[in-house]
Image: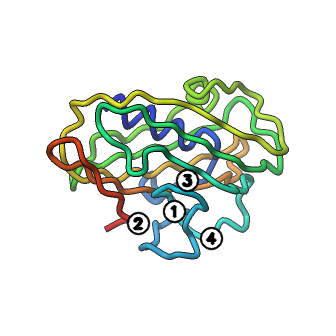
């Protein structure tokens, strides 16, 4: 579970987003749509059209993609924030293992971004994030769905991202585009 929290935080700390229907609001995650795919070598997709997001993600690259248990996951992300993100921002994270919800939490974004060597306030403008995450080799095989949704302290949407990764027995993994 630490892998999922750290990996999701690392992937999403470079982004910041809106409240999801998982937390009682109106955003619904769309089925895979090529137009919603986050550019780069990754399994990420925007939950809906990101035209009003505070974060414009230019690319997110994972190496290896798909992630592999027992290996180091290198994450490189670039994007542009159109406004500062300050204390009070929140990230809503849900991780499902198959149909079972294993993480459903709302966290302080400023605490979460410490995992990727950032701190608040996150200044507007261009930014690049590079982070290595050591994945435990004991990740149980199965399909994991991750949704991360982030708000500024004033509840402005920064971004909403989703990904599905399936870990196979013997250390392999498969990336699924969109929720299935």
Q: Which residue is mark 2?
A: 177
Image point (43%, 56%), residue name: 163
Contact, mark 3 vs mark 4 (Cβ under 8 Å): no
Q: Which residue is mark 1?
A: 45
**Alpha carbon separation for disc pair 1 and 4:** 10 Å
Q: Nearer the viewer, mark 2 or mark 4?
A: 2
Residue 106 to residue 119: above or below: below
Residue 6 in picture, x, y percent from top left: 45, 32
Q: Nearer the viewer, mark 1 or mark 3?
A: 1
Residue 19: mark in rendering: 3
**Alpha carbon separation for disc pair 1 and 3:** 16 Å
| Helix, strand or loop at mark 3 | loop
Q: Earlier in the sequence, mark 3 or mark 4?
A: 3
Q: Tell me the quadrant of the picture where the N terminus can be found.
A: top left
- Please state which of residues 7 and 41 is positioned toward the viewer in this rendering: 41
Contact, mark 2 vs mark 4 (Cβ under 8 Å): no
Residue 154 in picture, x, y percent from top left: 73, 44
**Alpha carbon separation for disc pair 2 and 4:** 16 Å
**Alpha carbon separation for disc pair 3 and 2:** 21 Å
**Alpha carbon separation for disc pair 1 and 2:** 7 Å
**Alpha carbon separation for disc pair 3 and 4:** 14 Å
Along the horizontal axis of the image, is 140 left or right of 90?
Answer: left
| Helix, strand or loop at mark 2 | loop
Q: Earlier in the sequence, mark 1 or mark 3?
A: 3
Q: Residues within 10 Å of mark 3 (few under 14, many from 20)?
A: many
Q: Which residue is mark 4?
A: 49
Q: Residues within 10 Å of mark 2 (few under 14, many from 20)?
A: some
| Helix, strand or loop at mark 4 | loop
Spot the residue most to the left: 169
């Amino acid at each position: 579970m630490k892998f999922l929290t750290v990996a999701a935080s690392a992937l999403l700390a470079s982004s910041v987003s809106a409240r999801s229907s998982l937390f009682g609001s109106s955003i619904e995650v769309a089925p895979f749509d090529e137009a919603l795919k986050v550019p780069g070598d990754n399994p990420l997709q925007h939950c809906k059209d990101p035209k009003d997001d505070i974060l414009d993600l230019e690319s997110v690259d994972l190496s290896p993609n798909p992630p592999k248990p027992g290996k180091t996951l290198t994450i490189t992300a670039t994007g542009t924030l159109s406004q500062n993100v300050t204390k009070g921002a929140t990230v809503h994270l849900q991780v499902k293992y198959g149909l079972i919800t294993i993480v459903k939490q709302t966290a302080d974004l400023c605490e979460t971004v410490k995992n990727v060597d950032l701190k608040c306030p996150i200044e507007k403008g261009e930014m690049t994030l590079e982070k290595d995450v050591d994945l435990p080799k004991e990740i149980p095989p199965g399909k994991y769905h991750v949704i991360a949704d982030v708000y500024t302290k004033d509840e402005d949407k920064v971004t909403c991202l989703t990904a599905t990764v399936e870990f196979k027995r013997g250390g392999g993994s498969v990336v699924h585009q969109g929720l299935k």
